[in-house]
Image (cartoon, helix red, strand yellow):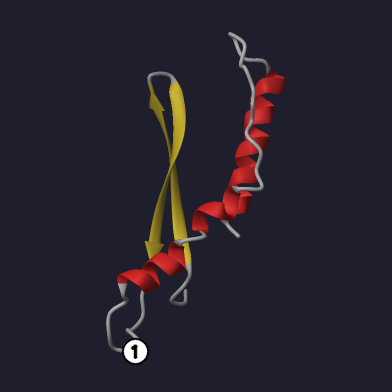
């Protein structure tokens, strides 16, 4: 087994009539590598920080609001609309 291999042990145990699977991961680690470059000295100014993060909120501006009134109980179509909108939001946040 090399440094990045892992072995898994699975156990099935009853808990109030429900069975679950428990994974145990064993990782081998090697020696530590050399220290990396510490980077340029100095601190970031408040203006630099404000400029860097100023437009990040706009990442999701292209996503329209859901505009959904959910019935009680919710239908599968309503829940799918929420799931689709969540997927759209996650994709936009990853850009």
Q: Does residue 28 appear in the picture of this structure?
A: no
Q: Quadrant of the C terminus?
A: bottom right
Q: Does residue 66 appear in the picture of this structure?
A: yes
Foreground residue, 9 or 75? Answer: 75
**In the figure, 15 relative to 31: above or below?**
above
Question: Looking at this rendering, what residue extends furthest in the top direction?
Answer: 72
Residue drawn at 36 percent across, 71 percent down: 47
Percent across and percent down for residue 29 are 36, 75
Percent across and percent down for residue 67 are 64, 26
Foreground residue, 53 or 77? Answer: 53
**In the figure, 69 relative to 33: above or below?**
above
The reply, left or right, for residue 17 in relation to residue 68 is left
**In the figure, 64 relative to 23: above or below?**
above
The answer to which quarter of the image holds residue 45 is bottom left
The answer to which quarter of the image holds residue 13 is top left
Percent across and percent down for residue 1 are 47, 74
* Circle 1: element type: loop
Percent across and percent down for residue 40 are 34, 89
Residue drawn at 72 percent across, 21 percent down: 77
Residue holding disc 1: 40
Residue drawn at 58 percent across, 57 percent down: 94
Question: Looking at this rendering, what residue extends furthest in the right direction?
Answer: 77
Numbered label tally: 1
Q: Residues within 10 Å of mark 1 (few under 14, many from 20)?
A: few
Residue drawn at 35 percent across, 90 percent down: 37
Question: Looking at this rendering, what residue extends furthest in the left direction?
Answer: 42
């Amino acid at each position: 087994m090399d440094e990045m291999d892992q072995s898994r042990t699975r156990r099935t145990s009853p808990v109030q009539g429900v069975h679950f699977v428990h994974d145990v991961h064993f990782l081998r680690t090697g020696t530590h590598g050399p220290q990396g470059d510490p980077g340029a000295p100095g601190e970031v100014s408040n203006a630099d920080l404000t400029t860097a993060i100023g437009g990040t909120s706009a990442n999701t501006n292209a996503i329209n609001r859901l505009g959904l009134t959910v019935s009680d109980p919710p239908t599968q179509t309503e829940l799918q609309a929420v799931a689709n909108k969540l997927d759209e939001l996650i994709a936009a946040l990853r850009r």
